[in-house]
Image (tube, rainbow, N blue to C red):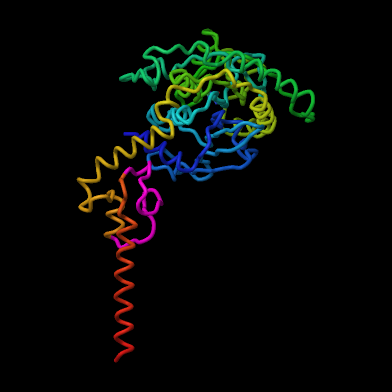
Amino acid sequence: MTDFVHILAQIYERIKETPDVGIICGTGLSNLSDSIQNKIVIPYSDIKGFPHSEVAGHKSEMVFGDLEGKKVIALRGRFHFYEGWPVDQVVLGVRVMAALGVRAIVVTNAAGGLDNSFRVGDLMLIEGHISFVGMAGHNPLIGMNDETEGPRFPSVTNVYDPAFGELFAKCFEQVKTQEHKSEEYKPELRRGCYFGVAGPNYESRHEIQMMRIVGAHAVGMSTVLEVTQAAHSGIKVLGISLITNNCLGTVPSEYNVGEPNHEEVQAASKMAGNFTQTVVSRWIGQVDLSDRTPSPLAGKYSREAVATMMAARASAAAPAASSSAGICPAGAAALKAGTGGKCPVTGAVAGIKTAACGVDRCSFVAGSAVGALVAGLLLGAFTLLKKNN
Ligand code: HPA
């Protein structure tokens, strides 16, 4: 089971400020975090209980810092349903960012173009989605609902915030006309509906046909679960698809020329990466979040609330697991192992009640200090004896 409070406690240890914008670095944004200033990088593997991928070459870290005048937290490496992650793990990053206090989330993805006018390298502003994976019963909101975190029956209708989208369209035009010089790559901004499938196979001709009939414009294997979670958590989203390939239709045409493959998806991501990053960075700089409220999770799991919850746990666990009063189990174990120095839980010195630990007047360091004193006295006496002989 995911220990959400413990995960947050570990992140709060490292990040001292509240992020404004959360970014899920999908295709097209994988290098966005390189532009973040005053970076604090936390590898997922450093966060006990947070999922991480062991695949070589896959980034698996969160990056906190400044981007275009905003505080951002970027998730580099996301968890796909097709990799076998349970849906609650797929959306865990969104819950974390909501709890940390973000007031907007940017999510990007690679997608196959279903609309015949779309070209490889175009960006599609996601105006809505069809969560085929969610409709098939893999929805992160299934199960008991905690009303303090979000409604039982949330609406996802306006989760892709129209105002966020309009600003993105403006930024896209600015970058395209003022900064973008490439003769080979001339992207258009499209708008439409993203059809979210589980994957990992690319779709059959008849599946593509069905998606076109129901009115979708692009298809991909991510995003919809995360956005569903964002809707529940009360955070609006800017969603962008990078069109990496054309989808085959039942009737061959000039447009659907061949079967999709991972190589062409990667090539398109490479071609469009810098442009997409520039537009998203500009959007982050210009977006006005002054009237946006954080998620209810930000209150429930604030830094102080998490510290209190961790403290309550430590004091509940301490009497059972430790024989020394005033020492938490980790401290007791460290003492037993003969580890001196600071408290292993908080790094604090003796006699301080720390929020993260909660053991009043912790005797861990005191215990080490008494040990050191006794050792010092014995050494002194021994030296004296030796001298007198
Ligand atoms: N289908 C599903 N996911 C994708 C595609 C596609 O054609 N292209 C990139 N991601």
In this view of the protein, can residue 138 be seen by the observer?
Answer: no
| Residue 345 highlighted magenta (yes or no) | yes
Left or right relative to 321: residue 311:
right
**Screen quadrant of the C terminus:** bottom left
Q: Main secondary structure of the magenta part?
A: loop
Which residue, as the protein is rendered here, is positioned at the far bottom?
A: 389
Is 157 rendered above or below residue 2?
above
Residue closest to the eye, 311 or 381: 381
- Please identify the quarter of the rendering in which residue 23 is found: top right
Residue closest to the eye, 118 or 358: 358
* Image location (x, y in percent) of residue 359: 30, 45
**Screen quadrant of the N terminus:** top left
Left or right relative to 359: residue 228:
right
Left or right relative to 252: residue 348:
left
Count the marks: how many?
Answer: 0
Residue closest to the eye, 337 or 200: 337
Ligand 1 positioned in quadrant: top right
* Image location (x, y in percent) of residue 380: 33, 78
Q: Magenta span covers which residues? A: 337-358
For the point 67% across and 20% down, which residue is it? 119
